Image (cartoon, rainbow, N blue to C red):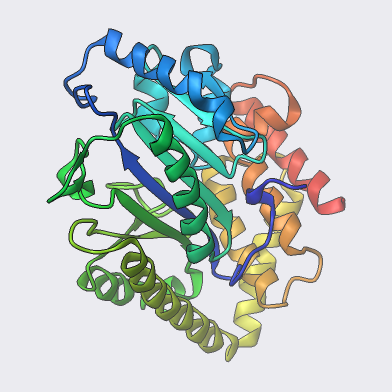
């Protein structure tokens, strides 16, 4: 079975993926920003001992045993945070399955960051899976919990349910019609975050944005999911309306997306940044039925295997920047011809 990032899902013309994350801490240990290295290692040991009881094909990997390219590939898949990958080599670990739809970061900002991910819009199903795993964990390790405030976390914004639900969306038509800023403002006004694909402070990459809840205290998990679904549905609706506006000028739209496809398919070398920009237009053209040479699976492969680390994992070689640019162009041709 293909990993989630190579699959299509609900509303996949606009929604790349959905992620549910639960922040938890183990009772009796200081928070990550105050604990000792020995505390961190003890927490990893505790989790390692219970992993076989969790099921789901999960296994624990210590960051110090993972090479840098593999760590970066996990960042590119949004399975671990950049800060965790770069700064927690000695004190961090992950619990992950082969499908990579479940990934638990150990000793990131909290002792436990349980994450489940899926292609497309799958908020309700993912919440159910996250809660199922969380209940198993809670039976095996004592959580830091307060009757008044809920789950205790290192960051005040996560106190309560500890839930952060997020949906990654592709909004090229809103960007091209000049309406993206208006949509971003509306989403932020509805107590939701919308930001660049790699989180706080990052720029959008290829017209991709992440919508997530701000509040986790005083609101149930189901309410969070319901509110996020309402906002995401509105964003999807606006993006599709913007695509209809673009389609009114058919020649200009076809010219734009086929120019992007032409460069992508015929370049001899291509940077990661340029590939992201071109792929945004190519995905738009494919989703709108203009580009017939590609399908959703090929676009998914192009998006994943043109990223620096996953490109190197795909070819099984360590490459410098220039070599990656050359190899990226080769891989694009291979995937298109498959």
User: How many marks do you count on the picture?
Assistant: 0
Q: Measured from the top left, where is residue 230 in percent x and y?
A: 38, 77
- Give above or below for 182 relative to 310: below
Q: Is residue 208 visible?
A: no
Q: Residue at x 24, y 56 (%)?
A: 216
Name the image quarter holding residue 304. top right
- Give above or below for 51 relative to 128: above
In the picture, measured across the screen, residue 253 lies left or right of residue 220, that is: right
Q: Measured from the top left, where is residue 195 in percent x and y?
A: 33, 57
Q: Is residue 194 visible?
A: yes
Q: Residue furthest bottom?
A: 248
Residue sitting nearer the eye, 235 or 260 = 235
Q: Residue furthest front?
A: 139
Q: Residue at x 36, y 12 (%)?
A: 41
- Give above or below for 182 relative to 218: below
Q: Residue furthest left?
A: 148
Q: Residue at x 53, y 26 (%)?
A: 51
Name the image quarter holding residue 188. bottom left
In the picture, measured across the screen, residue 295 lies left or right of residue 43, that is: right
Q: Residue furthest top?
A: 38
Q: Measured from the top left, where is residue 50 in percent x and y?
A: 49, 24
Q: Measured from the top left, where is residue 125 in percent x and y?
A: 54, 62
Q: Residue at x 49, y 75 (%)?
A: 173
In the picture, measured across the screen, residue 37 lies left or right of residue 78, that is: left
Name the image quarter holding residue 189. bottom left
Residue sitting nearer the eye, 269 or 46 = 46
- Give above or below for 46 relative to 338: above
């Amino acid at each position: 079975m293909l990993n989630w990032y190579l699959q299509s899902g609900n509303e996949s013309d606009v929604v790349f993926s959905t992620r549910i994350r639960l922040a938890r801490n183990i009772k009796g240990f200081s928070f990550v920003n105050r604990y000792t290295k020995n505390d961190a290692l003890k927490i990893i040991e505790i989790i390692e001992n219970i992993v076989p009881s969790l099921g789901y094909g999960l296994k624990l990997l210590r960051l110090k045993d993972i090479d840098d390219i593999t760590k970066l590939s996990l960042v590119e898949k949004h399975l671990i945070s950049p800060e965790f990958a770069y700064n927690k080599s000695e004190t961090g670990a992950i619990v992950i399955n082969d499908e990579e739809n479940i990934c638990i970061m150990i000793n990131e900002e909290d002792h436990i960051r349980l994450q489940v991910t899926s292609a497309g819009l799958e908020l309700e199903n993912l919440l159910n899976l996250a809660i199922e795993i969380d209940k198993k964990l809670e039976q095996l390790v004592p959580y830091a919990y307060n009757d008044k405030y809920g789950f205790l976390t290192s960051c005040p914004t996560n106190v309560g349910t500890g839930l952060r639900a997020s949906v990654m969306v592709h909004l090229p038509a809103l960007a091209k019609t000049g309406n993206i800023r208006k949509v971003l403002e509306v989403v932020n006004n509805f107590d939701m975050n919308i930001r660049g694909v790699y989180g706080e402070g990052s720029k959008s990459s290829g017209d991709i944005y992440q919508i997530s809840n701000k509040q986790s205290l005083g609101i149930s998990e189901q309410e969070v999911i319901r509110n996020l679904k309402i906002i995401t549905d509105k964003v999807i609706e606006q993006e599709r309306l913007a695509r209809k506006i673009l389609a009114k000028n058919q020649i200009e739209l076809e010219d734009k997306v086929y120019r992007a496809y032409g460069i992508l398919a015929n370049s001899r070398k291509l940077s990661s940044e340029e590939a992201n920009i071109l792929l945004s237009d190519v995905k738009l053209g494919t989703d709108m039925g203009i580009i017939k040479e590609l399908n959703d699976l090929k676009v998914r492969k192009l998006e994943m295997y043109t990223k620096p680390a996953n490109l190197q994992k795909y070819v099984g070689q360590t490459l410098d920047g220039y070599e990656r640019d050359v190899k990226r162009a080769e891989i694009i041709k291979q995937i298109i011809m498959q």
